[in-house]
Amino acid sequence: MTTTTNAPVTAAPVQTTPRTRARVPARSGIWFLAPYLFFFALFLVWPIVYGLWMSLTDRSLASTGSEFVGLGNYTQALTDPDMWSALGNTVFFTLISSVPLVVVSFAMAYLVYTGLKGQWLWRLTFFAPFLLPVSVVTAIWGFLFTNDFGLINGSLDRLGIAQVGWLSDERVAMWSIALVTVWWTVGFNFLLYLSALQNIPDHLYEAAQLDGAGVWRRLLSITLPMMKSTTWLVILLQILASLKVFDQIFLLTAGGPNGATRSILQYIYDAGFTGYRLGFASATSYIFFALIVMVSLGQMWIAKRKDS
């Protein structure tokens, strides 16, 4: 006699490969990225593509239709003396503002880092202007720069010194705007430098001090070399920010006097929203965009060469 038992039958385990296991989280991750990709394409990719197409047409705010003109807008922009004048003003502003914004911010951070008394007050004083909106900054400095009753010219008059047309003299106006910009934005670079200084290992300074290195030797041999990457970052960010200057110039001088402070962004603004030439303004903005890309790539190449 034979006895049979009904043992439960278990299915063989499904063999999974690393590729199969990785496919499931990859598919689920796309849904988490989908909202970001949608808004990225809607607010960045599409405007870039549409603006590039518009730069090849004679699109205007004064009419509904537009015609394809090819590279005509680019040719006209590159042969316009006013465009080159505005670009020259922008480059000049970048030069006279970027240097002090790098040097002064490092000096401020180094003073605080070396144990300046009342550090909390100095940190607040150095960074507070950066928190102000541009309208407040230009209102304050516009009053200080006023020719007749401004605080600066009033002080010069009491000292028997001739008044200066800070915003009305073509030779001085851009320097005045650079001064306002340095006072307003130096706090951001100050924080970057201060954070980098605090990350330098203390044992390097202790070893150098035991070897008899003074303050200047420690600064030149330890601090500056350790700050190289931060300095290149600050220079890159500052040049890009200065090239895109618009707000303070527009509010203080509106590009005057006689176009002496007119930046390239104001030139684009005037072409698009004052002259209603959206196609021409788009072409000029892409020329400026190409310049920014070239500057960024050039700085990155120089930084890599120095590191190697």
Image: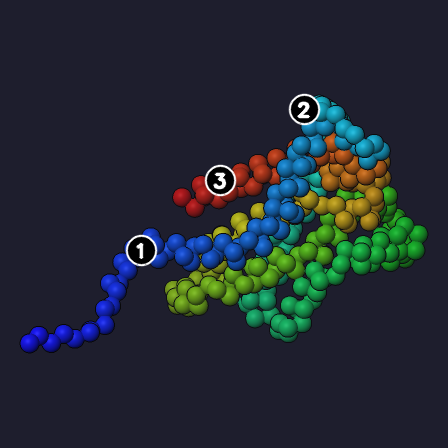
Asked if labels 3 and 1 touch by Cβ distance under 8 angstroms, the answer is no
Q: Residues within 10 Å of mark 3 (few under 14, many from 20)?
A: few
Q: CA distance from mark 2 to mark 1?
A: 52 Å
Q: Secondary structure at mark 1?
A: helix
Q: Secondary structure at mark 2?
A: loop
Residue type beneath disc 3:
Trp
Which residue has dot 3 on it? 301
Q: Secondary structure at mark 3?
A: helix
The label on residue 18 is: 1
Q: Position of residue 199 (x, y in %)?
A: 48, 64
- Residue 124 placement, left or right of 215: right
> Is residue 156 in view?
no
Q: Position of residue 50 (x, y in %)?
A: 67, 37
**Above-or-below relation of 65 to 257:** above
Write the residue at 28% across / 60% down: 14
Tell me the quadrant of the picture where the N terminus can be found.
bottom left
Write the residue at 46% across / 63% down: 200
Asked if labels 3 and 2 touch by Cβ distance under 8 angstroms, the answer is no
Residue type beneath disc 2:
Leu
Nearer the viewer's eye, disc 2 or disc 3? 2
Which residue has dot 2 on it? 71
Q: Earlier in the sequence, mark 2 or mark 1?
A: 1
> Is residue 208 in view?
yes
**Above-or-below relation of 22 to 117:** above
